Amino acid sequence: MMRKYLLLLGASVALMLGLCATNQRPVDATVRATATIYLHGHHGGERSMDDLMASAEAADDAHSVITAVVQRDGKVDLHGYWPADTVRPLVKVVFKNNRTTRRHRISNWLRNVLVALRDRYGITKFNMVAHSMGNIACLFYELRYGRDPQMPQLHKYVALGGNFDGIPGHNRHQHPNHTLPDGRPAWLSPNFKQALRLRQNFPRKVQVLNIYGDMDGQHNDGKVLNASSRSLGFLLKKRLKSYREIKVRGWEAQHAMLRSNPQVALNVNQFLFP
């Protein structure tokens, strides 16, 4: 009888432990500090955002902790080590397919990253620093999923060289564009028209810093028109906690150079880590 009792007791304890293990979060999923996510643009890669991240580490006691690699099928692989007591954790996101311009695809990939970071590390808030096409991923993620209370919430957002209203040569029928007195771009891309229809979904408590380059007064950064980058203000300004634009001039205002421009890095860091 005693042996039978011990066997039943052992089975009950094992069952209870198994249920607990099934329902609990991963061991390292304690709530972390707000993660700052860096996302490259079209044709970007693993090294694209390194200068900005290195600047944050040097000036603001921030630390790179995780690289999230999104495979072509959308699967997310997390690499690195994230100590739970990191005050200013930096996360790099790399899209293996860095050529697609499909807004729903790349915004879904960003959602996959945030789900992985939430489930593995318990994040509830994040900042975003996006360059070029990475801004489309961020914008449409927020327009589609930003109000989901189960997802981490965007706190601060830095847009670099954002192509919110298209890129010449990439959008059919686009012509030289300009900003109207009310901030609306004169020509509207299909992406921007859809964003206008969805803008009421964008969270209201977000702070935004929009940085764009103007090479030699040409109203573009060599790739993206200023009207396209600045259209973010017309789209979201009235919904945000704060919105600020910074125009960068000179040879370092070129589209790709925005990622390594010291002036840009200084403004980004002061905004994120005041």
Image: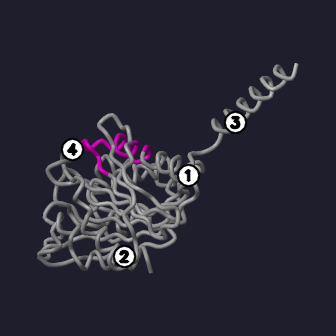
Spot occupied by residue 237 in the image (x, y as percentages of width and height): 44, 67
| Circle number at residue 99 | 4
**Mark 1, other Cα within 10 Å: few <14 / some 14–19 / many ≥20:** some
Q: Provide the secondary structure element on which disc 3 rests.
A: helix
Task: First in sequence, mark 4 or 2: give its number.
Answer: 4
Q: Residue 224 or 30: which is nearer the viewer? A: 30
Task: First in sequence, mark 1 or 2: give its number.
Answer: 1
* Residue identifier under label 1: 29
Task: First in sequence, mark 1 or 4: give its number.
Answer: 1
Amino acid type, mark 1: Ala
* Residue identifier under label 3: 17
For marks 1 and 4, give the CA distance: 33 Å
Disc nearest the viewer among 1 and 2: 1
43 to the left or right of 104: left
Which quadrant is home to the C terminus? bottom left
Which quadrant is home to the N terminus? top right
Amino acid type, mark 2: Asn
Disc nearest the viewer among 2 and 3: 3
For marks 1 and 2, give the CA distance: 27 Å
